[in-house]
Image (cartoon, grey):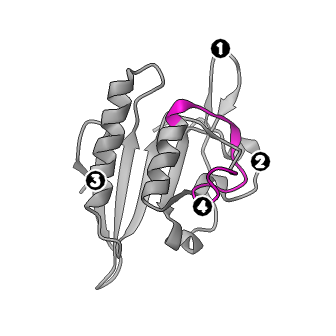
Amino acid sequence: MPRPVSDRIMMMRLPLSKDNVAKIIGVNAPTMTNPDENKEAFYKQLASVLIGIPRTDKLLLIGDFNERIGRDNNNWPLVMGKHGIGKCNSNGELLLALCSEFELIVTNTMFKQKDERKTPWMQSRSGHWHMIDFIIMRCLDQMDIYSTRAMRGANC
């Protein structure tokens, strides 16, 4: 059963085998319009959750991060692949820094695929589609994933 860590973070423990466990952390990060203090508090709280997860556990960090990490992976080659979308924003920098600190990779950027399979949200004013939902895992476990896709218009 998922356990709320806060109003924006939920964690679930999934036994995989006798000795293996996966921790699935679901998030709904503050949007760009939130004060910087809220964003910093969210990432501080998420970091404290990640610190408590043993390195031997599989980790999936998933959710609506409300940020854009862009396509330029020159500064973040260990954190993101070469198949991002658009430009990075300040919230994206926070996420990439967290991923770097905890040796995590944004799997959405690892696979070449059509943009509509990477961009679930359209900004109504500009009409541009954005990648703001991510699946993130430990860099060491990236060989366990074969593809990551976004589902546009999922009504859940």
Q: Which mark's residue is nearer the viewer, 1 or 3?
A: 3
Which corner quadrant holds the N terminus? Answer: bottom left
Q: Amino acid at mark 4?
A: Leu
Q: Which mark's residue is nearer the viewer, 4 or 2?
A: 4
Q: How many marks?
A: 4
Tag shown at residue 125: 1
Could you give the CA–CA distance between mark 2 and mark 3, rounded to whole angstroms?
Answer: 33 Å
Q: Which mark's residue is nearer the viewer, 4 or 3?
A: 4
Residue 146 image position (x, y, % from top left): 63, 68
First in residue order: circle 4 vs circle 1: 4
Name the residue that disc number 4 marks.
78
Left or right: residue 125 compared with residue 40 = right
Q: What secondary structure do most residues of the magenta stretch adopt? A: loop
Note whether 154 is above or below 33 in the view shown.
Answer: below
Could you give the CA–CA distance between mark 2 and mark 1, rounded to whole angstroms?
Answer: 23 Å
Give the extent of the magenta segment. Answer: 74-91
Q: Secondary structure at mark 4?
A: loop
First in residue order: circle 4 vs circle 2: 4
Q: Secondary structure at mark 2?
A: loop
For image coordinates 30% across by 84% down, the residue present is 19
Residue 149 image position (x, y, % from top left): 62, 52
Name the residue that disc number 3 marks.
49
First in residue order: circle 1 vs circle 3: 3
Name the residue that disc number 2 marks.
114
For image coordinates 53% across by 31% down, the residue present is 90
Circle 1 Cα neighbour tier, 10 Å, few/some/many (<14 / 14–19 / ≥20): few
